[in-house]
Image: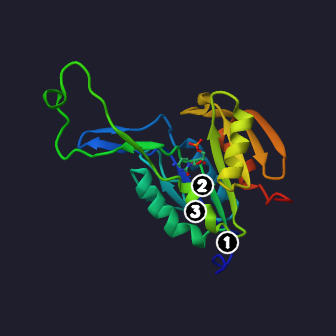
Amino acid sequence: MSPRKGVQKRVLVTAGPTRERIDPVRYLSNDSSGKMGFAIAAASVAAGHEVVLIAGPVDLETPKGVKRIDVESAREMLAEVRKAFPECDTLFMAAAVCDFRPARRLRGKWRKKDVGQERASLELIPNPDILGAITRRKGDRLVVGFALETSDGLRRAREKLERKRMDYVVLNGPSALNATKTSVKILGRDGSQRDLAGRTKSAVAKVLVGLRAPSKG
Ligand code: C5P
């Protein structure tokens, strides 16, 4: 299937954190604002692409011309990505997916008197790896993922690039969280590296949307 007439490509973007429920009023999450993914969605529309944006809980306006699907948990995000991936040409997986979720979601509020006053612990189980799962059927789609690392970034990001079958991985640090400006390294499957320092997320998004498939795999 090809994109609608006049449309360049079909671009799928994920953005924001996921939220993993402990009970009806509490959850585990992270500091992702969704700004990078939303900037990629906006830049993709500006480049003439058709865009589906799967967003975790964020406080951002939907860029004009974007079809947005809101999700909460990693498992909900996986289900929506699975549905949209076969129809896309490019995936930008910018979401900060929680690696773990509570083993049980309590129906009622978790109360101190139920778990003991001195110490309480929460059992966690791993969430599915969304990229790892869907790139098993990657075909010739362009897949760009992100890696936020606090140490040994280049090695860890390259390891993720291989393991999750990405074409490019965008390496950044914790200072990127919730910030307007960011510094990133874009690492390609072909061994390429491009450094962008102190740029706005819109400027980085424009570069990412312009990426072409790396020459060798
Ligand atoms: O969290 P991590 O550094 O492993 O994320 C690397 C890439 O994998 C990111 O693009 C992220 O969106 C994606 N990811 C995923 N499913 C997870 C965790 C991360 O798709 N459960």
Given residues 132 and 203, the one toward you in this image is: 132
| Residue matched to label 1 | 7
The reply to whether discs 1 and 3 touch (Cβ–Cβ < 8 Å) is: no
Asked if 99 appears above or below 111 in the picture, the reply is below
Counting from the top left corner in percent of width and height, residue 181 is at: 65, 33
The reply to whether discs 2 and 3 touch (Cβ–Cβ < 8 Å) is: no
Asked if 1 appears above or below 136 in the picture, the reply is below
Mark sitting on residue 41: 2
Asked if 151 appears above or below 98 in the picture, the reply is above
Q: Residues within 10 Å of mark 3 (few under 14, many from 20)?
A: some
Q: Which quarter of the rendering shows the C terminus?
A: bottom right
Determine the residue located farthest toward the top in the rendered image.
118
Within 8 Å: ligand 1 and the Cβ of disc 1?
no
Element at label 1: loop
119 displayed left or right of 82: left
Is residue 129 in view?
Answer: yes
Q: Residue at x 63, y 33 (%)?
A: 149
Q: Residues within 10 Å of mark 2 (few under 14, many from 20)?
A: many
Determine the residue located farthest toward the left in the rendered image.
113
Asked if 105 appears above or below 3 in the picture, the reply is above
185 displayed left or right of 49: right
Counting from the top left corner in percent of width and height, residue 159 is at: 70, 44
| Residue matched to label 3 | 134
Q: Residue at x 67, y 72 (%)?
A: 7
**First of labels 1, 2 by sequence position:** 1
Q: Residue at x 66, y 33 (%)?
A: 182
50 displayed left or right of 71: right
Counting from the top left corner in percent of width and height, residue 44 is at: 65, 58
Q: Measure the alpha-carbon separation of dots 2 and 3.
A: 20 Å
Mark nearest the camera among 2 and 3 is 3
**First of labels 1, 3 by sequence position:** 1
Name the amino acid type tagged 2.
Answer: Ala
